[in-house]
Image (cartoon, rainbow, N blue to C red):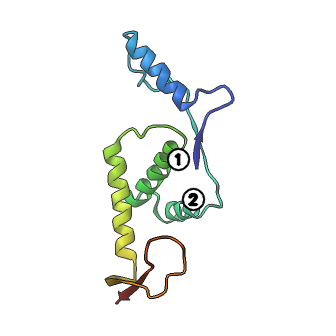
């Protein structure tokens, strides 16, 4: 997903510049809706994340989880397109909630990890090779 401008739209960098110029000249901060042109969210309907969102919307579009997932997709698209996230605290909360859900849903729980030096080191770097053994439930 990406946020894009129309053919004659201003880039995120230009929007930041115009906002800074307005504030420096004693004007408003440019936060009034419609003061800057609106970006369009473009998605790839074949992407697994977009397909997951589609399934979530069809199942229960009013659920908080579905709404958070959609807003998170929009925020990430905006960030990767050069825009700033409006409310970083809410963004961080949505990311942490998604991480918590993933952590709870994982079937394999790592109980212990042991790292040992491997006996044979075939590569040319100075670091000794490591061998990892993971014990799961």
Q: Residue 35, how many percent across, how many down? A: 49, 22
Q: Position of residue 9 (x, y in %)?
A: 62, 27
Whether 93 is drawn above or below 88: the answer is below
Is residue 53 shown left or right of residue 4?
A: left
Q: Which residue is mark 1?
A: 77
Q: For mark 2, what is the residue?
A: 50
Q: Where the C terminus falls, by quadrant? A: bottom left
Say which label, 2 or 1, has the lower sequence index: 2
Residue ranking furthest to the top:
25
Q: Give the SS element for disc 1.
A: helix
Instruction: Please name which of the two marks, 2 or 1, marks the residue nearer to the observer.
Output: 1
User: 4 and 120: which one is in front?
Assistant: 120
| Image spot of residue 73 (x, y percent) | 49, 52
Against 57, residue 16 (above or below) is above
> What is the number of the mark on residue 14?
none
Label 2 neighbour load within 10 Å: few <14, some 14-19, many 20+: some
Q: Could you tell me which secondary element the residue under label 2 belongs to?
A: helix
Up/down of 108 relative to 52, above or below: below
Question: Looking at the picture, how far across and down is residue 109, in whole percent?
Answer: 35, 82
Residue drawn at x 43%, y 21% as measured from the top left: 30
Decide if residue 47 is on the left or right side of residue 75.
right
Quadrant hosting residue 45: bottom right
Residue 1 visible here: yes
Task: Reply above or below: 68 against 12.
Answer: below
């Amino acid at each position: 997903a990406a946020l894009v401008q129309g053919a004659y739209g201003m880039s995120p960098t230009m929007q930041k510049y115009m906002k800074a110029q307005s504030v420096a000249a004693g004007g408003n901060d440019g936060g009034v809706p419609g003061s800057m042109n609106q970006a369009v969210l473009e998605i790839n309907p074949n992407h697994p994340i977009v397909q997951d969102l589609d399934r979530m919307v069809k199942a229960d579009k009013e659920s908080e989880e579905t709404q958070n997932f959609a807003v998170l997709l929009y925020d990430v698209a905006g960030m990767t397109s050069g825009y700033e996230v409006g409310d970083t605290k809410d963004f961080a909360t949505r990311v942490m909630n998604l991480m918590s859900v993933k952590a709870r849903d994982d079937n394999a729980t790592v109980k212990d990890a042991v790292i040992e030096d491997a006996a044979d080191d075939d590569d040319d770097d100075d670091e000794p090779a490591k061998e990892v053994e993971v014990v799961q439930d």
